[in-house]
Every structure is written in structure tokens, then in C-alpha cells.
Image (cartoon, rainbow, N blue to C red):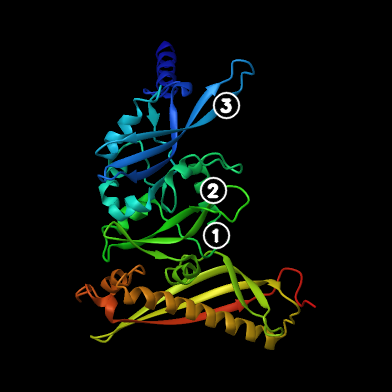
Amino acid sequence: MKKIMFSLILSMCLLFNGCYNYRDINKVIFATSLIIDIDEQSNPILYMETFKPYRSATSGSDKGERIVYKGKGKTVFEALRDMGLSSSYKINGTQCKAIIFTEKAAAYGIDNFIDFFDRDQEFLIRQYIAIFEGDVERLAKIKMKSEEYVGIFLTDLMSNIGTASRSIELSINDYLNKRLEPPYATVLTVLKINDDQIEDILSIDGGAIIKDDKFVDRLPQNESQGYNFIINKVKSGTLEIPNPEEDNKFVALEIRSSKTKTKLDYNGNTLKYKKIIKVRTTLGEAQKSVSLTNEEIDKITKRAEKNIEVACKDVFNKYKNRDLDIFDVQKDFHKKYPKKDSKDIFKDTEIEVEAHVYLEGSSNKLNFR
């Protein structure tokens, strides 16, 4: 019986033992986002947004404050250690939600900075990566009422990305994979401080095209929907088309689901790159009047299909002429034709888009007068 009790006590001691490197939470500063810029010598300048928890002596409640640290060095690692000279406690990177590069740093080359985040054990590769367009000091000092911390705000913003089919998102993990796969090009989220809002707030403004780890071009927001349809990234959103019953008025369709399939056909000279897009929608809004008869539904869906086809072809041909394969054509070609030379296949690609839009009506209201 004593042996059983001793074994039980020993097991409980092992199972309920605390983490060997546990630290008092009041003695740790947590990073929530990291902004990377460069100086005139192309050395990194880091702005780290942090959360410093502390316990109020009067109320006994847990509180915290936002502190932004700035560090400089020849490398990211040195710049982070430089921040330690101004911090009373060690900065912990396990809660970092976003890595944000300035346009200047991204144009110089993300490969000069990205290795640290893949190698370091604290920083997680599921955090978001983005490019900021604007004054970096203004971003570091921004005070948003909806969410005090930029990193947490960006995570929430990405979680809400399904409401907008014109948004771009990418994690560090996805970027690390794409930068090593032909054609070595991808699109990152572009952030800017929206001056159209009453108060300072961050918003997504299209994408930044990264080629060989360098920022080389922009994907405007009005072209992002066509891009997302091609790469099968549309979850929901809206389609605006002319109202068939009223001139200069519009009908808005809400995207409920979307699926894009790809078919390739290579004849030895030209690659036929076919995208079959199926979109299920409901009627979100109609300006003036609309009658959802079979004839009117057919007109609306045909116009929506044409808009999708035109948007996809326009964005594809634009970046084909610039030799920026952000659609993974080379990768798809290599999968189907592994023995063929895929290096210059993007230049010999012709896109064909076949869109199918299904209008299912709105939840409890059909016609509008």
C-alpha cells in the first residue's frame, strides 16, 4: 500500500510541476508587433510595439500599457538587443502578431531581415506580414480607439477579411514558402493610415508585389478582387453591377461562396490557362427598383459574370506584360508538366475565364419598388 501511495504522490509531482522557465508575468514585456525600417546606410531600424502588464497597487486589478521601443543595429538581432538597453525587463516575442516592413525596407530587400524570424525560437511564423505605406513615425505613435495595439488590430482585421473580396493577406509561414518556389513572386498586404476616416485608423489598401524578396510593384485595391478570384482566395464580399431596370443605378450582390478551378492545356508553344469560377450570391441591395423575374435574374447574373471575367483578364494581362507571375502559373505548369521547361512559360500563357454566378435571392425579400 505504501508503494502505491508513494508512486501516486511521485506521479502527481511530475504531472503538476510548473514550467521550468516560468517567469512572473509582471516581469515580462510582450511584443505585439514589429515595424522594420532602414536608415541611409540601409541598416535596420526597428520599432517594437509592446504590452507591459502591471498590477495596480490601489485596485488590485490587472492592467497594462502600450510602450514602443526603438532600436538600431547592423542586423535585426543587434537592433533587438539595442532595445534591451531601454527596457527594464526582457522583451518576449511569443505574442507578436505582425511583422510590418516600410516601403523603403521592402524595396531594399526583405531577405536582409527575414532570416531572424524563421530562426528565432520566440517569434512564431504564423504571424502576419505586411508593407506599410506612409510615415513610419506616425504608425509607431498611432492611437486607435477601436484597438490600442497595432498587432492585435491587424489580426482582428485579417479575421474580418472575408467581408471584403478586395483584401490581401499572407502569413510569415506562407511568405517563407513562396519566396523559395518559382516564380519567386508573391503579394503582401499593404497598410496605410486612412485619412478619409474621422480618426486615425489603419486600413488595407491593396497589395505589394514582391519579386526575389524586393518590393517591385503595387496591386491597387480596385484590381485585388480579380486577383483573388484567380488564386481562389475569395471567401465573401460584394459584386456591383448596373441595374438592368434603371440607368446609372446599381445592384449589389453579396458573395456567399466562391470556388475557382484551374485547367491547363499546353500545345508545345502556348499554355491555355483556364479558370472556372463558380460564385453563389444573394441580392444585397438595389438602387431604385428591381424585379427578380427569371429574365431579370438572367440579366443580372450575366452582367456579374462579365464583370468577373473582365476583371480577371485585365489584372492577369497587366502583370503578364510586366513579367510578374503573381498567379503561380509557373508552379501550376510544373506540377502538370514536370518534364517541360517552365522558366519562361508565363510569357507564353493565354488566360481564359469562365464565370458562373448563381443568384439565390435575399433572405426574406425579393423584389424592390
Q: Amino acid at mark 2?
A: Asp
SS under mark 3? strand
Give the answer, above or below, for where 75 lies relative to 332.
above
First reached walking from the N terminus: tag 3 or tag 2:
3
**Left of 366 or right of it: where is 360?**
left
**Left of 241 or right of it: where is 312?**
left
Residue 63's disc is 3
Q: Quadrant of residue 252?
A: bottom right
Q: Which residue is mark 1?
A: 162
The picture places residue 330, in percent across and down from the top left corner, at: 28, 71
Quarter of the rendering occupied by the N terminus: top left
First reached walking from the N terminus: tag 3 or tag 1:
3
Q: Nearer the viewer, residue 6 or 343?
A: 343
First reached walking from the N terminus: tag 2 or tag 1:
2
Rendered residue at 43%/79% (across/down): 313
Q: Nearer the viewer, residue 313 or 263?
A: 313
Q: Residues within 10 Å of mark 1 (few under 14, many from 20)?
A: some
Rendered residue at 47%/67% (across/down): 224
Q: Residues within 10 Å of mark 3 (few under 14, many from 20)?
A: few
Q: Amino acid at mark 3?
A: Lys
Q: Say whether marks 3 and 2 touch (CB < 8 Å).
A: no
Residue 156's disc is 2
Rendered residue at 55%/39% (across/down): 148
